[in-house]
Image (cartoon, rainbow, N blue to C red):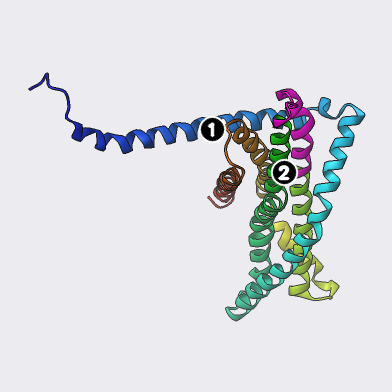
Amino acid sequence: MSGRPLGPSVNPLLAPLRRWHQRLRAALLGAWQVLLLAAELLVLVLHPATYRTAAQRQRLMRQLVQVVPPLIWPLLVVTALLGLVLIRIVVTTAQQYGLSQYALEVVVRTLVLELIPLGAALFVAVRAALPMSQAWRRHLVGLSRQGRAPSHAQLLMGELAPRAFALGFAVLLLCGLAGTLMLGLSYLSVYGLSPWGWPFYTEAVGGVFTPAVTLIFVLKTLAMATAVAVVPLAGGAWAHTQGEPLRRSDMAELARLSLVLLALQTASLVGNYY
């Protein structure tokens, strides 16, 4: 009995497990390759040699002009509309429960400290990073079909690094503008046009932005800007080398980037409140 081979009824039980193992192995390998490409891209973005020549600086300025200005007004309009609604809800609720002195602190903590960086990162990702990754991949496919595909160094230095710098700068700039707008709207919602609320306002905001909280806020914003800058582009490059369809890669990159941003947001919440 011990020398008999296993019957064919065992194979249907092992086949799903084997397929699951293969998919998991491919997913982990792809994530590792994307991480390596993202690390290379991040080093190039931070290295001064990437912007040494006039042609490199010209490519960088072209990407900044194409990416940043179209994003400013839409984000500010959306931030103002949603901010006014949320601020009004918080202030009215605090007044009803006799907690008006905490309304401004709740607004600053909730909107400026937590939602603005995440919202700016997602806005840049959906409006700029993912479409840019798709357009760049289509261009790369055309070059490959013509036999003019760039080398790995040319791809990172000439194509991806300026795009990554523009995306990261867009996240930081929009986060600063939206945060400043939200601070101004919160003051107007609580104190109106009166200048006499300024000492109480600065005291409340300063009480929120302690050195530890400010450090976590800055690190979180930089990390989210880095993720938006490098994850979609690196994922698109890896997907192109694997021959994946464009639409499938777009959804995969959105899911991957959302997981990274969620992990960063969770880490910041743990650092601030635990």
Q: Secondary structure at mark 2?
A: helix
Give the quadrant of the N terminus. top left
Residue 166 bears which disc, if any? none
Q: Secondary structure at mark 1?
A: helix
Q: Position of residue 188 (x, y in %)?
A: 78, 72
* Residue that mark 1 sits on: 30
Check if residue 157 falls in the magenta segment: yes
Q: Residue at x 60, y 81 (%)?
A: 96
Residue type pointed to by label 2: Ala
In this picture, which residue range is highlighted in magenta?
145-167
Q: Closer to the observer: label 2 or label 1?
A: 2
Residue 119, picture quadrant: bottom right
Mark 1 Cα-neighbour bin, 10 Å: few <14, some 14–19, many ≥20: some
Residue 36, picture quadrant: top right
Magenta segment main secondary structure: helix
Q: Position of residue 245 (x, y in %)?
A: 58, 41
* Residue that mark 2 sits on: 135
Q: Spatial distance from mark 2 to mark 1, Cα to Cα?
A: 21 Å
Residue 104 as seen in the image, left or right of residue 64: left
Q: Is residue 76 above or below residue 158?
A: below
Residue type pointed to by label 1: Gly
